[in-house]
Amino acid sequence: MSKINELFDSELRVINLGLESFSEELKLQKKEVVHVEWRPVAGGNKKLRNILNQLG
Amino acid sequence: MLKEKIEQANQEAMEKLLKAQPTLVGLGTAGKDIPDMNKKTILHAGPPVKWEKMSGPLKGAIIGGLIYEGLAENAEEAVKLAESGEITFDSCHHHSAVGPMAGVVTASMPVWIVENTAFGNKAYCTLNEGLGKVLRYGAYSDEVIDRLNWIEKTLAPVLEETIALSGPIDLQTMIAQVIQMGDEGHNRNKAGTSLLIRELAPFLVQTSFDNQEKSDVLRFIHGNDHFFLNLTMPAFKSSLDPLEGIPYSTLVYTMARNGTEFGIRIAGLGNRWFTAPAEVIDGLFFPGYTKEDANPDIGDSVICETAGAGGFAMAAAIPIVQFVGGTPQDAMNFTKSMYEITQGENTSFKVPVLDFKGTPTGIDIRKVVETGILPIINTGIAHKDAGVGQVGAGLVRPPMKCFEEALEAFAESVGIS
């Protein structure tokens, strides 16, 4: 059995980043999940990200 | 090098804010005490806005203000005068003043005088009229004007003499206390108003007014939980004004709305406003009203959040969710999330349920843009039409555009793009 199958046979411990609907789906299947409200820096705006890099 | 300069500047700004000693020193009259004001000046909440672009509640409050001043007989005359160009409209913030909701201040209105004794600057605010049909929500019927006249002729003179007898009242300590008594200093002012009565009553009974007038004044304050709001606001205004013009600081020292636009000012960028259309508030409405009736966000009271109170201190004021909506857990989460976008913790305002941790204080535009987390504000909701008044209360956030444009302007000011 490959390592990946071993993982899916074990108790899942899930941390979900980004789209919250993924975590909701797991909750519906009664799986424990921690949702992290993560967004890309400056909402992904390159110009603002560049400014932030220079301003600390 | 630049990063260090910003860090030092923000630390200096934070120290100035935390060192503030807002103190109630007396009552005055707008036309005499507020800088650069005369009979034909009308101050309003938020960033500057022209009559044509003003929202319904702000126009309504201006109509009421002109009638109260005797400059117009009725609404039609008031509108004509407002359109004529004879009246100078300006932001309260340009005159060391703040005003809740429409924030209209006219020359004859009595004003609280608050001095930040650590830096010697003053701030002014009118006296709170109560809830329902009131000028600050854009109502201007006879009952509104009659109440304004009573405030001028009875309430203010009694309080002026009271404070002359009591001497200055330390508002910083009082606000620190009320945040441990279930208030957050913006939309819950039950504790603050109660403490104020305790401070004033022993001296109020010694004034030269007759018992009926003294009783009327105490009953009026007792009947209006928000009476203390018009003291927290100038207290915070006087605490934040010394931050204006600290080079390299990225901290916000003003947030304000005029019902059309939301505006912010940044310590390192002086008096320059960054504005965007004001958002509609998500909240609880009084019976008979819905979101369709609501005007976009309005008022200078968001000075509370700017100073680390209001929405930022909601974990200290759990019962407020029954007034503005949400759950007790939401109130906790709001306060906790604000630490992500602030410079540090308040050294006076402590949240009991968070092990007496200081409230999140000193909004940094860099952190707001980086995280996408916007300041949380709890606020009253005005009807969109002039003359109606308050229709509910709720929660709102500023438009991200204000913070993004401020960050770009800041970058330009320090030579990067």
Image (tube, coloured by chain):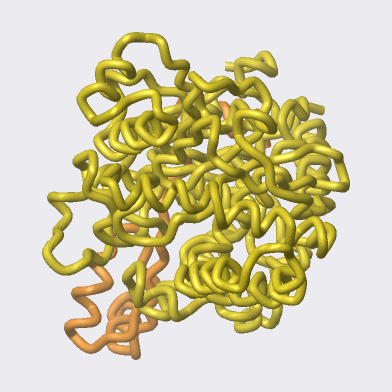
Let me know if residue A11 appears in the view.
yes
Q: Which residue is drawn at 69% across and 77% down?
A: B198
Give residue B101's position: percent from left, percent from top.
Answer: 41, 46
Quarter-wise, where is residue B377 in the image?
bottom left
Camera-side residue of B387 and B8: B387
The furthest residue to the top: B85
Q: Which of A37 and B379 is in front in this view?
A: B379
Q: Which of B371 and B36 is in front in this view?
A: B36
Report whether B296 appears left or right of B237: left
Q: Which residue is drawn at 39% across and 46% down?
A: B136
Query: Front-most of A51 and B384?
Result: B384
In which quadrant of the rendered image does the C terminus of chain B lie?
top right
Q: Which chain identifier belongs to the yellow chain?
A: B
Image location of residue B236, percent across then percent down: 66, 50
Query: Residue at the front extreme?
Result: B210
Does residue B192 appear anywhere in the picture?
A: no
Q: In this view, does B166 lie to the left or right of B181?
A: right
Q: Colour of chain A?
A: orange
Q: Residue at x 33, y 85 (%)?
A: A32
Q: On screen, B355 above or below A42? A: below
Q: In this view, does B396 lie above or below B176?
A: above
Quadrant the N terminus of chain B occupies: top right
Give percent across and percent down for residue B203: 76, 70
User: Which percent across, then down, holds residue B328?
Assistant: 42, 80
